[in-house]
Image (spheres, rainbow, N blue to C red):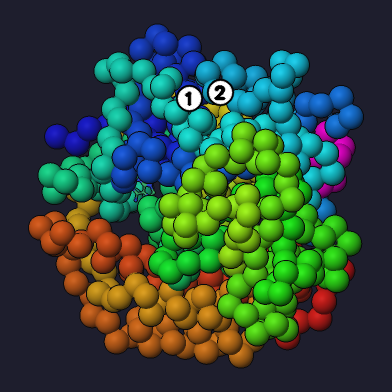
Amino acid sequence: MKKHYDIIIVGSGVAGLSTLLYLIASEAYIKGNLSIAVIAKGAIDETNTDWAQGGIAAVAAMQDNYEKHIEDTMNAGGYVNDIHIVKKVVQSGPAIMHDLLDWGICLDKKTDGTFDLVKEGGHSEARIWHYQDTTGHALQMALTNNIPTTQKLDLKTNNTVLGIEKDINGIFHLLNYHNETKFTENLSCDKLVLATGGLGTVFEKTTNQSIATGDGIYFSHHLGAKISNLSYIQFHPTGLYKEGPISFLISEALRGAGAILVNKIGESFMHQYDERGSLAPRDIVSRSILSEMQKTNSSHVYLDATKVDTIYLATHFPNIINKCKEILNLNIFQDLIPVIPTQHYSCGGIAVNEYGESTIAGLFAIGECANTGLHGANRLASNSLLEAIAFAKFATSQLLKKTVLTSSIIASEDIKLPKYKEIERLPIQKIISNHAGVTKSNKGLNIGLEALYQISDSAPFIEFDINNKDAIKLWENHIILELSIMLIKDALEQKKNIGVHYNVDLLLFS
Ligand code: FAD
Ligand code: SIN
């Protein structure tokens, strides 16, 4: 018998869990009239959220104000942001911080007892709330600690949603696969929240967790929802330069604390490219680094943190200090840190309105998988955690509205296991990384698209085999291929260079 819920939330990061926490505070839930399931394909904290470093942007300090945060967000986004959304999210910042503190998040304070707000690239004021350089972990823990254990809530970790359909009644049907027991089950719900995060693994190197395969965007596309600006991919200027698909992030907050980018002969170069130097917006810094690498014929540049006050460095960046030691045996008090622009964040995604509703009734998208209009053509640092919590809050009233059935016919057919194209992941990632990276060209994009079509055309469809230990990975490869094709097509449709979109064949937009 298929289990039905009022609301299913797919995702256990900041978007999924803050949606849950706002919902369980509702009268409907408290009175026992709201059933909810949360599904996550890994452990509860196997999320990009858990890896967030720098912090959460929100106005608080005396010298700061909403206008400044709004202007910084618009400026980073190339002024194509949705101004209504920017105002709404920025103005919700203080209340969101209040909610987070209520949920018990631990954030750094100064010796005078006030919160220790820091600066990151593109911010005109110090407004980043943080816990050392592991804010995401502090956030993930606070949210997780508030999950209730009641019958009205089913928490399904290590469960991958493999299929979503919507019936003529407006009910969503999900096929859920338990990664370890190989057990599949069909679930249904009135309202569905996709909080599935980004798509970093589409690229050869990313700062994202391996769960970031863009599943929510893929499902939404197949349900017919509008997907927008999928090619607006933000590269973080300072991914640690090393072998392997996942790059450890060197937080922008380190540049906020005074670390500077230098080339292979130790020369500071950013001021030749932008007067804001190492703290210019990420798109500018990433392009400048690539240009400097080309000029100096190097495979990477360096971040020099050796002049940052040692006590400040030790107290604010213990994780970066430890990880650089562990991964490359570097002592960042003395050694330069090798860095390279690395895929980091998806600014586009499932198009939603100010309540997180997609173009499909009852289908919500919150967090990195959504395109809310906040970021425009480039996200301002530390605005995404704020955005996810703000939209979780904005969505609550719509999620609590009862669904009106559009037909008396009840469709209860089970969803079949998916078919997918059996392909390898790395060749796709290489194509995307080579042709749809920081700098694009029409020729490169067309070569990339053709190569992806060839991979797609030559691969047969196969049935999802629940007993194959690699079944999930193979199925994700199929998603990665489809999203890669969508991403390149979107890049080819972009008409101007703005924010993260930079195509050498387009005239510069200013
Ligand atoms: P996630 O936290 O990634 O969660 C996605 C969830 O969806 C997971 O639980 C996953 O299991 C689940 N899921 C996905 N597909 C399926 C499926 N098919 N079935 C079941 N479950 C599924 N932003 C800031 O604002 N400040 C920062 O300091 C900051 N630092 C960052 C540092 C790093 C290294 C990275 C990678 C990102 C950083 N970001 C930062 C960005 C920010 O962390 C993310 O945008 C945000 O955490 C995304 O949250 P989310 O809830 O949308 O997705
Ligand atoms: C960082 O700490 O540099 C990441 C911040 C972000 O992605 O917003």
Residue at (48%, 12%) from the top-left corner?
Answer: 27
In the shown orientation, is residue 449 left or right of residue 133? Answer: left
Distance between mark 1 and mark 2 Cα atoms: 8 Å
Residue 2, relative to residue 120: is it above or below?
above
> Where is residue 495 shown, x and y percent of the image?
73, 75
State whether the magenta stretch is mostly helix, strand or loop.
Answer: helix
Q: What amino acid is found at the position of numbered circle 2 in the picture? A: Cys
> Where is residue 152 shown, x and y percent of the image?
31, 19
Residue 494, relative to residue 7: is it above or below?
below
Question: Which residue does the numbered mark 2 point to in the structure image?
Answer: 106
Q: Quadrant of residue 467?
A: bottom left
Look at the numbered disc 2 and give the secondary structure of its residue.
loop
Residue 142 marker: 1
In the shown orientation, is residue 445 left or right of residue 42? Answer: right
Look at the numbered disc 1 and give the secondary structure of its residue.
helix
> Where is residue 320 shown, x and y percent of the image?
55, 47
Residue at (42%, 65%) from the top-left corner?
Answer: 245
Residue 5, relative to residue 121: is it above or below?
above
Q: Give 187 or 308, whichever is nearer the viewer.
A: 308
Q: Please check the rendered image and state whether residue 96 is part of the magenta-colored stretch, yes or no.
A: no
The magenta segment is 66-73
The residue furthest front is 334
Residue 145, visible in the rendered structure: yes
Tag 1–tag 2 contact (CB < 8 Å): yes
The residue furthest left is 467
What crowding class fits label 2: few (fewer than 14 Cα within 10 Å), some (14-19), or many (20 or more)? some
Q: Quadrant of residue 335?
A: bottom right
Residue at (41%, 16%) from the top-left corner?
Answer: 29
In the shown orientation, is residue 156 left or right of residue 16? Answer: left
> Where is residue 414 shown, x and y percent of the image?
19, 48
Residue 258, relative to residue 246: is it above or below?
above
Quarter of the figure with the N terminus: top left
